[in-house]
Image (tube, rainbow, N blue to C red):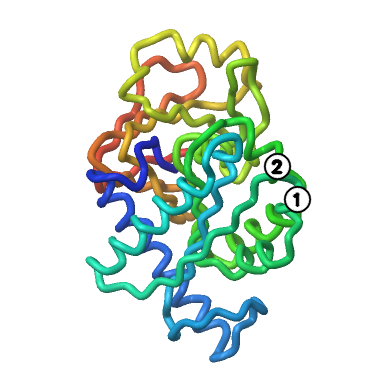
Amino acid sequence: MHGGGENVAGDERFLDALLSAAGHAAARRAAAAGGADVTGHAVEAPPGTIRVVIVPTAAARGRPERAAEMGRAAFARRAAVTGRSVAIEVAPIVDAASARNPTHVAGLRAADLIHLPGGDPDVIPAILGDSPALEAIEAAWQRGGVVAGASAGAMALAEWAWTPTGGIRGLGLVRGLAVVPHYDDVRRTAWQRALDDLAPGGIGYLGLDERTGVISEPAHDQGRRWRVAGVGAAWWFARGSDRPVVGWDGELLILP
């Protein structure tokens, strides 16, 4: 989950951390396949290549092709710098019909890294919710793939999000919290009290500075452990708390 300002200069730490995590996912997929592609998706790429799929759904009301191209260029650039092999696809899911498209669904199911860039926070749950595309995203995730979102994309991955007209349910891949992106612009405001009026009980809030995010790691009996990557900080407010636990690049946060 990323606080926004994605794919631009200064975001290299988070992009590299994503590719590193996705590299582990690609290695596990290759080992499990034993030389055969168990996902059923034909990709012309050498073994060990990281399969990246960019899903610009949040930009459906604007210019999804621009969001996708920025993501493609950023991942290709960082892969070249870090010496990683990547195969980058775009799944232009912008409505209910494209969320059922068999080609997009197959690509998502086979992905090692699925990236949802920013846009409008209400669009992703509305289009992807209960769709074949979401089923494919969850299948890739359960197989060990990385599912990442920036700004509105991060908001949608959480249990709860909000729009100018009120709170909405997110996709729920991350339980127990709502994401506050672009946090360096809104900290120390009344946002938490406002969200408390909209959100269900029992959730906390994760503020993420721009060009900064968190990537989950298994922590066994400790819940989920999230490593911070980026130039800013991650600010975790447990439910009802006005004092955050703050993590900086390379540090760990324990979240629900």
Q: Position of residue 149 (x, y in %)?
A: 49, 45
Q: Amino acid at mark 1?
A: Ser
Q: Which residue is mark 1?
A: 131
- Distance from the alpha carbon under mark 1 to that under mark 2: 8 Å
Q: State which quadrant residue 103 falls in.
A: bottom right
Q: Position of residue 62 (x, y in %)?
A: 55, 36
Residue 221 visible, this angle: no
Q: Residue at x 63, y 66 (%)?
A: 109
Q: Position of residue 67 (x, y in %)?
A: 46, 46
Question: Is residue 102 rendered to the left or right of residue 239?
Answer: right
At mark 2, the secondary structure is: helix
Question: Is residue 179 rendered to the left or right of residue 124?
Answer: left
Q: Position of residue 71 (x, y in %)?
A: 41, 53
Identify which residue, 173 or 52, lies in the foreground.
Answer: 52
Q: Which residue is mark 2?
A: 127
Q: Is residue 150 above or below residue 196?
A: below
Q: Amino acid at mark 2?
A: Ile
Do the residues bearing badges 1 and 2 touch, measured as CB atoms within 8 Å?
A: yes
Question: Is residue 214 rendered to the left or right of residue 99?
Answer: left
